[in-house]
Amino acid sequence: MRITILTSTRADWGLLAPLAKALRAHGEEVSVVAANMHFMPQLGDTWREIAADGFDIARRILPGATPADTAATTLRGVAEAMREIRPDCAVILGDRYEMLAAATACTLERVPVVHIAGGAVSEGAFDDSFRHAITKLSTLHLTETEAYRRRVIQLGENPEAVINTGAIGLQAITGAEPMPLGELEESLRFSLSDPTLLVTMHAATLSPLPPERQIEELIAALESRRALRVVFTHPNNDTDPAPLVARIEAFAARNPERVCTVPSLGARRYTSALHYVAAVVGNSSSGIVEAPSAGIPTLDIGIRQRGRTAADSVVHCGNTAQEIAEGLDRILDPAFRRAARQTVNPYYRPDTTGTMVRAITEFRFHEHSYKRFHDLH
């Protein structure tokens, strides 16, 4: 098969890379189309990670000045790429606005879409609507939980085309050896001595609180807990990240002995860090989906991920500095940290990558060329 992987962020490529490698090892012809944040120097120029993983980039689609501009350039660029590559299917993960544009382009070029991680709910961001819209443009659905599988079917999708595979990122945490602690610390030029937090805070696009205020409240909470060390990664570009990055960098400049900022850790350093930090803090989906499999707590801040299935090791809190500080105290309580080591991750299933490879390569896309709404009875 000719299979195209569509990627636009450090986060989705980190999850998709093992699948791309597994499909290629299976004998399939795999191409990669990269867009948006991969080509933003302030967010790490993460297209280099795709090359480092051994994949040429078949087409590069640069970000626009605004999310709408980026969506427009992505739609045009993916459509042109599909006409050139003519893949048997295109693989999309998640719920970002430019991935909705990519799915639209594939539909217009009659390329079936394989959608990973549909059926979830994250009520605090535009992504929630984008995810469900991508579902309706997709032919094959690989969901992270059985509840999400049922929700995709509820949206009218054919049950035969909806498969619960588990979350794609968990095998990298449970099955791969992390970087040695010394090597990771050397690459960061920062000690991960306990207690160190791994912090990522994106804009919650449907929150009444402006993104700048969201990050200021988090920083105020971290300032009030000066015993904590912090590895702070940069936010994505759901909104202009520059004002948020400026505040993060200023926080680090005030606290150079205990705060490290990194535009992008990359997949290997990120999954390795989960084995050594005390907790994950912020509002990234990774704190809910991946972190529990590392046996560490997560503090999920604000409404961005509201509604998403979560393990017992995840604590939700409000946006204010006081609420965040109280949440930090709770997740770092020794008893809670011990309990987190035993938590059951609802996103885990054995051999997720292998299940996905079989689902994609055995699916008869030609028999599903017309979308029919599946009614529940």
Image (cartoon, rainbow, N blue to C red):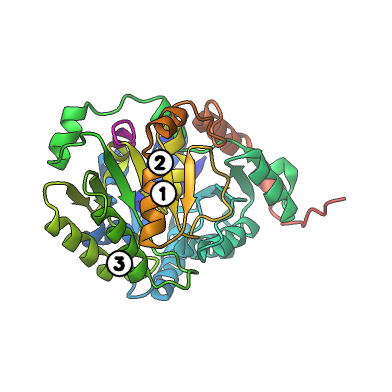
Q: Residue furthest right?
A: 377
Image location (x, y in percent) of residue 158: 74, 48
Q: Is residue 123 above or below residue 92?
A: below
Instruction: Look at the numbered discs 2 and 3 and tell me whether their residues touch, using CB distance below 8 Å.
Output: no
Instruction: Give the mark nearer the N terminus: 2 vs 3.
Output: 3
**Magenta span covers which residues?**
271-277
Say left or right for 18 vs 37.
Answer: right
The amino acid sitting under disc 2 is Ile
**Pointer 3 residue:** 241
203 or 173, nearer to the observer: 203
Residue receiving disc 2: 331
Q: Which of label 1 and label 3 is nearer to you?
A: 1
x%, y% of residue 49?
27, 45
> Residue 330 placed where, x, y %?
41, 43
Q: Secondary structure at mark 2?
A: helix
- Look at discs 2 and 3 and give the one toward the viewer: 2
Q: Residues within 10 Å of mark 3 (few under 14, many from 20)?
A: some
* Amino acid tagged 1: Gly
Q: Closest to the observer: 188 or 366?
A: 188
Residue drawn where x is 39% and y is 75% of the image: 69
In this rendering, does residue 61 appear at all?
no
User: In the rendered structure, does residue 138 fall within the stretch colored magenta?
Assistant: no
Look at 57% across and 38% down and name the residue there. Answer: 360
What amino acid is at disc 3?
Pro
Residue at left 37%, top 31%? 334
Q: CA distance from mark 2 to mark 3?
A: 28 Å
Instruction: Depth check: give the residue in front, 85 or 199.
Output: 199
Residue 83 screen position, x and y as percent: 48, 60
Under circle 3, the secondary element is: loop
Q: Which residue is mark 1?
A: 327
Q: Earlier in the sequence, mark 1 or mark 3?
A: 3
